[in-house]
Image (cartoon, helix red, strand yellow):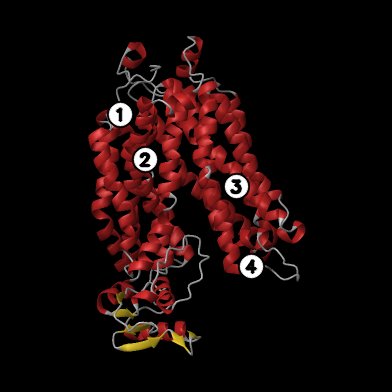
Amino acid sequence: MATVSGAHAHAEPRPMTSAEKKVIFASSLGTVFEWYDFYLYGSLAAIIGAQFFNVAGADGKPMFDEATRNIFSLLAFAAGFIVRPFGALVFGRIGDLVGRKYTFLVTILIMGLSTFVVALLPSSTSIGIAAPIILIALRLLQGLALGGEYGGAATYVAEHAPHGRRGFYTSWIQTTATLGLFLSLIVILTTRTIIGEAEFAAWGWRVPFGVSIVLLGVSVWIRLQLSESPAFQKMKDEGKHSTAPLTEAFGQWKNAKIALLALFGLVMGQGVVWYTGQFYALFFLQSILKIDGYTANLLIAYSLAVGTVGFIIFGALSDKIGRKPIILAGCLLAALTYFPLFGALTKNANPTLANALETVKVQVVADAADCGDLFNPIGTRKFTSSCDLARDALSKGAIRYTSNLTAAAGEKAKVVVNDKEIAVFKDGKLDADFGKNLTAAAVAAGYPKADDAGKVKISGVFDIFSSQTLTIIGILTILVVYVTMVYGPIAAALVELFPTRIRYTSMSLPYHIGNGWFGGLLPATAFALVAQTGDIYYGLWYPIGFALITFVVGLIFIPETKDRDIYAHD
């Protein structure tokens, strides 16, 4: 890989021109789409489930209950993540063959239209099974487009940036998560306020998806006015662009090795730190600490608003001290501090629960042969054994337990809360009162009631000026700062690792595997670890483990790239 060479590589850092500002703005709008849709779809998952997965069976009755519909809705969303690496291959190849501008113009058209068509799609009550099939197809199209969008935007901006400013320029792309979040919240809340909850559930939910056409129109109009990346244009004019980007990127070991190192030495750790700081933190607040959705989302929103400036700070700092030290420091700090930070989050957000975790002794007494694994990433598994039913109920109730697998062979499991025993089975099947009895025993022993007054609760957007709320926002902001450390410089680092002729293809694949797969699997895997062990913090070993692997691999094998000449072809 070439190091600094040529006039361009030695040019002094200079202020941003109006044309370069337009490049950043146009490129960032596609990422706004990504986040706008992400939060939009997540916020409206229950409504989407009711609209598109309420399919009637042969008897005319709904085939799925509400919980199952919601699960299918989330699975349709997850499908977009699964196909992103394939989109990276398809559009990365086109980007290296044809050009950056053309390719990410196509990706944003596919992505934007896929989002907009959801607003027009008839529900399952109108067209039956075709509704969910079309919805999933739209999600797959959007996932494919997104697989090419980020790599194109990052490459395009970096190849326009003056030497010494690539980290700063590309960091603007990373800030769009906050804009997408706030945009989705504003559109949803405004629509709900204007038309009311009943009308919103009936048809108003389509408005936020329809609004995406405005984002699409503005973005396409601006992108049509842009010119091709100067690095790609120079290479194409010289006849040195790749004619087989996929083969060259992944069929030649010298390049494939760099892609693997980028995945394990940069992106894998970045992906899990990113998902932990934003999405697992939200999951932890809602599903484990039992904080209401409005409060949890608002706390995350405030932490993002405060911490987002870190993307720009660390992007600019990486131009001075390098990409590698900032990204690896973020991974190491996250790995070393996740346990105390999430412990502090529990103590402040739900102090009664924090105390119960330390003082209440809960055991599952069972026959070892009766206990299986509790991995349930899509929520569709039905547990039948008494041991699994007991542990599943305890984990969903955020009750810390230990397993005592000394019961006689064939004996049904029981839960012991301090000294009180609760039977799981009665007359050979699940006791209909098991859940109620378990909750009563846990509350009597010291676990919080559902309406526990000690839990943090925000009743309005500006109801945050209490020591409890500000402390929680502070903790969440630290998690977001780690996100900005690993994510702010990552685009520049990936662009600089690969030669111009195969850059789009090469950087897109490790990015989407690291974020879409390692990051995307985090919530489900982490909760499975919690359920299996009975420890609400045990799921943190997932991001900690991968962050430490990235720290070690990156420290040993990843070169510093900030001074490389990205105009080099080889």
Three-letter amino acid code of the residue under disc 2: Val
Q: Nearer the viewer, mark 4 or mark 3?
A: 4
Q: Earlier in the sequence, mark 1 or mark 4?
A: 4
Give the left or right position of residue 151, taking residue 402 as reference. Answer: right
Quarter where residue 386 is shown: bottom left
Residue in view at x 39 percent, y 22 percent: 499
Residue 470 visible in this rendered orientation of the protein: yes
Q: Nearer the viewer, mark 2 or mark 1?
A: 2
Three-letter amino acid code of the residue under disc 4: Phe
Pointer 1 residue = 319
Q: Nearer the viewer, mark 3 or mark 1?
A: 3
Please report contact status of discs 3 and 2: CB closer than 8 Å, yes or no.
no
Quarter where residue 463 is shown: bottom left
Query: Is disc 2 placed on a helix, strand or loop?
Result: helix
Pointer 3 residue = 139
Query: Is disc 3 placed on a helix, strand or loop?
Result: helix
Q: Quadrant of the N terminus?
A: top left
Pointer 2 residue = 267
